[in-house]
Amino acid sequence: MDVFGSFSLLLAFVCAVYAFVGGIAAIKTRHPLLIKSTRQAGMAACVLIFLATISLEYLFFSDNFSMAYVVSHSNRDLSTFYKIAALWSGQEGSLLFWSTLLSIYILSVLIAYRNKNGELMPYVGVVLAGVQIFFLTLNNFVENPFKTLATVGASGLLEPFTRMDGNGLNPLLQYPEMVIHPPNLYSGYTGFTIPFAFALAALLARYPGEKWIHLTRKWTMIAWCFQSIGIMLGAHWAYAVLGWGGYWGWDPVENASLLPWLTGTAFLHSVMMQEKRGMMKVWNVWLVFCTFLLCILGTFLTRSGVVSSVHAFANSQIGPWFVGFILLTLAVCFTAYFKNRDYLKSENQLDSMVSRESSFLFNNLLFLVACIAVLSGTLFPVFSEWFTNNRISVGAPFFNKIMVPIGLAILFLTGVGPLLAWRKTSADSMKRNFGWPLIAGLIAAVLFFIAGYHEPASLLCFFLCFFVFWTVVLEFYRGAKVISARTGMDMMMSAHELAMRNTRRYGGYIVHFGMVLVFIGIAGVPFNKDVQKTMNIGDSMKLGPYTLSLQSADTKVEKNYTAQRMIVEVLEGKDQKQIMMLYPEKRQFQGNEQAAGTMVAIYSTLRQDLYVVYAGMDPDTNMPVIHAFLNPLVKWIWLGGVWVVMGTLLALMPNRRTTLVLAGAPEPAAAPAAAPALTPSATLREGHD
Amino acid sequence: MRLSNAVIPSEARDVLFVRRRTKRTASLAVLLAFAIGSLWTTQLAAQSERAKQVGMHIKCMCKGCDMTAGGCAHPGGAFSGPCDSAKAELRQIDDLLAQGKSEQQIIDAFVAQYGTIAYVEPPKHGFGLVAWIMPFFYFLLGLALVVFIVRKWAMRPAAASSAAPPSHNEVLDRARAQAARETED
């Protein structure tokens, strides 16, 4: 099976090269048969990559310990569930997995557009094949996952040999979320290849800017959705498994996932400028180019180890390949842009600084500055080592200081932007749109202050969150009221109808609402408390309103690990009301004696999380150590993530029917309250905003 | 393995709580000594909490966790932190605090000992200043660019309609017609 997998990969490489070279020839000659054959070669490359991936999974499931990659990342007792995840737990498998997910996208595009966009698709096929060739080069010639174990035999020649068992999967990865987090994140990374390919293809084919945006709208949203889910799952995994009480540590790998998400989010906003007003065409093309390059850079940072040390770059086999690919891609993008930039001219004008257009510009500015801040902070240790020979570490406190004001400014624009009119917003309109949200924000800030949240940045965040929340509510309310007045439906049904008529716009508002919930959760961070205590059975400790009592401890023997489990009773309040039992664990996995896994026990409420870690036995006293955290508002982050995904899914749905254009329509006499419908924010417009 | 009181040394006591021993026969001197001891312990506990706070600004030097000395949870380790390295650093911070050193002096002492790798955030001087300035520099640069672009757009001749922007460029017209011919949605 290893030979089959290896051969499939090699054949996929050949097919991708043919799709690339033949595709260029097809563009030049426009020969229909050549176009068809290169498209089919692209499809064949995708299928062959699937076969290679299935082969590797088969080797995991069949416990083939003659394979170096299987030995390093699996063992006989590893459950089936985690044998799937073992595929992407190491360098070689991760890169193969990248190729696989990219293939799914490429195959979908090639099939979906096989009879459409005849002139554009050969360009798209060439760009996609180019990206595929790069990853297949790594898969075949640099980090091949199908290497077999060998030893020097009696004859002095290398002979294959098989180990009895493998080293097992990294304990930190043996958690259900780790089976779904990387596929989501990688689907985000790879998904941005599609808008990149269409943008570059449209530029090479000299199409005006709007065409590629129209074609790739949904692909971009799908990639963004996967990236968002991946980031959220990664944060939840860090929270539930690593046992440090937090969910985001500004680790280089976390930052790498955030970078394309930030530029991708900027793109999803600025693309509306192009669609509605024919502006920012150059900017959008470069945003997509940058997002794709940041996906590649993120993969490079994650896999090369360059951030842990600049010297890792020299030692890393893949480092120079990635740098070469990034430089080559940049060169192609610059060449295509300078050659065909005349086709990306903006066509409209702007009347005022206080307008939807300028809010999009500021939105993009903030997302880009956030991206640069995260990127420069992540790479700063490398830069400092290059320039001064002294490596200066950059940790969470730096990122928190820089990113909090940027995040709050973005949150502010989340509320303001959608309520500004295109071209120019009048003072009256601003008063009407922002009055209630401002009052709601102020009331919320006062209530949170009374509740004991006295940190200024958090209070500002609460104020902005409720401000944005009310702007979203008012948008739904005003729109629903118009529909209700016209159709007689109740407000809930009207709101539903409204959302279904313009899914993209109202899906976007739901995403904004989700982000508000995420920000509420983040605003709780300054109020985290923790206590760590060496406890005897029967001992207790207090944390906030809770009393934790260590009742007993036991040992759980499972197939692949042995867990030492603490049984902790949680009591609440002065009357010591029993709430629940928590069971934090420490797991020791077979084949990985050096590393241990932590299973945190969490009692989660909307107000706060009681987060209990069994840290292990105190080396000095040989007694169990319990580390308990009280983390306010964390649950809101996960709820926010769910809303973000739901909003994106809504935005991906087709509009139920042609959107009514009510602007200027006579108001029904029976519904004078529908007057706000004539304001720019509440008017149901054609298309998307 | 089942943990029970039997396997845990009964004489071991939590470091945060000192159980008072009350014996009727205790002399005044012993009580006095105990009181002084309690005071010292309380001071030490407070100092350790302060050490943890200062330790939040100094990196754990174990090279295995990439966390701070004060917040080391050492993920993946047999003991979820602080690891031995972080403990040693916290003890060292305690000593330096006892000597009356300020937070910045302690950070400087660690940087002198371990190099700039001990920083958790770049120093606001020398090359470290670049890290702090860069985001603000790009923000100001971007802001200037946005203002410039908005003004440039505002100076353009007004378009007839925003919903259906007219093209003013033959090249674009031709390209748009070509794109419409060659693609379908």
Image (cartoon, rainbow, N blue to C red):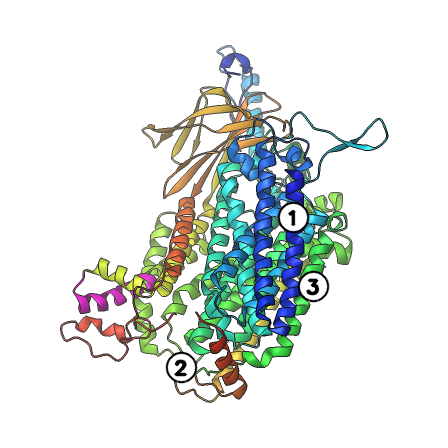
Identify whether A646 is placed above or below A665.
above
Magenta run includes residue A483: yes
Marks 3 and 2, how far apart at CA = 39 Å
Q: Position of residue A597 (x, y in %)?
A: 56, 32
**Chain for disc number 3:** A
Q: Is residue B41 shown left or right of residue A469?
A: right
Residue drawn 62% across and 52% down?
A: A299
**Chain for disc number 1:** A
Q: Are marks 3 and 1 on the same chain?
A: yes
Nearest to the observer: residue A178 or residue A404: A178
Q: Which mark is residue B164?
A: 2
Amino acid type at circle 2 is: Ala
Nearest to the observer: residue B102 or residue B12: B12
Marks 2 and 1, how far apart at CA = 49 Å
Q: Quadrant of residue A616?
A: top right
| Dot in front, 2 or 1 | 1
Magenta run includes residue B123: no
* Quadrant in the picture for the N terminus of chain A: top right
Identify whether B149 is placed above or below A324.
below
Question: Where are the magenta residues, as a range?
Answer: A471-489
Residue drawn 43% across and 88% down?
A: B158
Residue ID for mark 1? A9
**Chain for disc number 2:** B
Nearest to the observer: residue A91 or residue B148: A91
Amino acid type at circle 3 is: Leu
| Dot in front, 3 or 1 | 1
Q: Is residue A119 shown left or right of residue A329?
A: left
